[in-house]
Image (cartoon, rainbow, N blue to C red):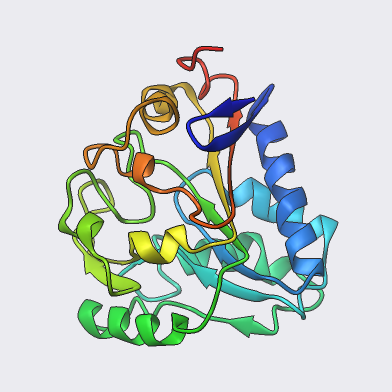
Amino acid sequence: MRARDAELIVTDDEESAAKQVAELLAEAARAGSEIALTGGSTPGRAYELAADLEPDWSGAGVWWGDERCVPPDDERSNFGLARRTLLDRLEAHPGRVHRIRGEDEPAAAAASYDQELRGTTLDLLLLGLGPDGHVASLFPNSPGLTETERLAIPAEAKLDPFVERVTLTPPALRSARRIVFLVTGEQKAEAVAGVLAGPPDPAVPGSLIRAESGETLAILDQKAASRLRD
């Protein structure tokens, strides 16, 4: 199934969606790809399953689409989520782990990550979606949506947890070879419809993010897809 510039996979439930994403992550790890992970409440199960499917990530590079400006051992940390659910479960850790330093001052952390990203093409970029349509830490109508030069910027949180963020910018996200949205739950259905079926709109940031030279895939459960028309 296709929506606007994206391929859709609609699964029966959240577990099935997690399995689909886990298979993509495991495949990318085996190939030694550069993989960008996401945070939030949805991807943890996919990470657990990916570690089971492929316990050797030694050839892969791991990045993050955004980070909360907290230490890595803080329960709100996106790196911390990935460490608990994925990295600590692996037999062989990724050969390249590019963590956003959330404990640093946001502008400095963003500038450092911008430089680290230069010259790298992300092979697989995993994105969640907020109920307001935000992706990474690009919130509705935020100034970062108009960024054209920088690859990582500081960002203000518009949803809980209300801590400062560092986020990849639209140019960095769009340059990925494969963008994968993982979205589950009825509370995301309206946002899914806006992102995948509506026009590009800064009020719905996810609608602006499509792979420029690759493919965009949305993996949804039936509840998240419930407001999409055939």
Residue 193 higher or lower than 96, as above or below: above
Q: Split into 4 quadrants, where in the image is the N terminus?
A: top right
**Residue 223: image location, x then y, percent:** 53, 19
Considering depth in this image, is 70 or 190 the residue closer to the camera?
Answer: 190
Where does the image place residue 69, in percent across and percent down from the top left? 30, 70
Left or right of 79 in this view: 50: right
Residue visible at 21% across and 80% down in the picture: 107
Q: Position of residue 123 (x, y in %)?
A: 62, 65
Work out whether 130 lies above or below 122.
Answer: above
Q: Would residue 215 be found to the left or right of residue 129 on screen?
A: right
Residue at 45% across / 73% down in the picture?
A: 73
- Rendered-image quadrant of the C terminus: top right
Q: Most extreme residue toward the top, as rendered?
A: 230
Against 187, residue 205 (above or below) is below
Q: 149 or 124, which lies in front?
A: 149
Left or right relative to 24: residue 190: left
The image quarter containing residue 137 is: bottom left
Identify the residue at horizontal 74%, vertical 63% (top origin).
28
Decide which of 193, 73 is in the foreground and name it. Answer: 193
Specify the quadrant of the image occupied by residue 57: bottom right
